[in-house]
Image: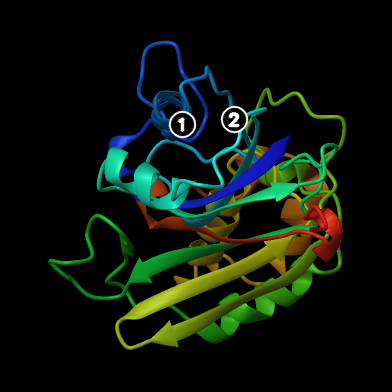
Amino acid sequence: MRFFIELSYNGKAYHGWQNQPNAISVQEVVEKALSTILKNEIAIMGAGRTDAGVHASQMFAHFDFEGDFKNIDIVYKLNSFLPKDIAVISVFEVKPEIHARFYAVSRTYHYKISTSKNVFDYDFAYEVQQPLDVEAMNEACKILFQYKDFQCFSKSNTEVKTYNCDIKEAFWTQHSNQLIFTITADRFLRNMVRAVVGTMVNIGLGKLKSEDLHKIIASKNRSEAGFSVPAHGLYLVKIVYPETIKLES
């Protein structure tokens, strides 16, 4: 039987989602917890990868298990076993062919920028104290919808079949002394969101004009785009699946 596990995590202490040979990952910690509680060697497959230091308020992964845990509160047991920076939200059965990564319809990220020094935010938002032109940054967001190929925002030496992404929404909002960038797409390239945000920050600082984004995207060259903002301001916040993935009871 195949199950989905929905979870959230503070990525500060982890070297990303995916298992690493010489560093602790979120995947490794969750697999160990599941294997201990279910008394079986459990491997999980995530809906995607988050880099070292990136957070997630919603992540999904799938795992296969032939036993029955309907009589135990699996969510409670996992949360009791897991460290304080990883929380399980739900566990539910899905159809056996459903893959957490390949069946996802869209993913949404937030990137948080603190516009003033905040002693409670420095681990969870990127601090930019210079004034940012949010209107120009939102004008640049509109340009993203005109393109599909975003190679210019992809980490170099990434092996992918295509650099095409279908961006469904992209915008900046102001919340007191914090700016939040929201971006939703069917898929994202490695380091893409952080590179987009770095380019947007350069536009907001007046180092680039919003229309310069046309030339940057057309170049397909990572060096033409802006810097990669720090990982600690990035959050995976939503993954959407078809409603039909769950196994009918």
Q: Nearer the viewer, residue 157 or 14?
A: 14
Left or right relative to 151: residue 15: left
Residue name at image x 51 percent, y 65 percent: 110
Provide the residue designation for mark 2: 44
What residue type is disc 2 on?
Ile
SS at mark 1 in the image: helix
Question: Residue 38 at x, y = what percent?
Answer: 48, 28
User: Is the residue marked by circle 1 packed among few (<14), some (14-19), or many (20+) residues within 10 Å?
Assistant: many
Residue name at image x 23 percent, y 75 percent: 116
Provide the residue designation for mark 1: 34
Q: Is residue 189 above or below residue 234?
A: above
Left or right relative to 214: residue 43: left
Question: Residue 99 at x, y = what percent?
Answer: 77, 39
Image quarter in which the N terminus is found? top right
Q: Nearer the viewer, residue 73 or 49?
A: 73
Q: Is residue 246 above or below residue 138?
A: above
Question: Residue 56 at x, y = what percent?
Answer: 47, 53
What residue type is disc 1 on?
Leu
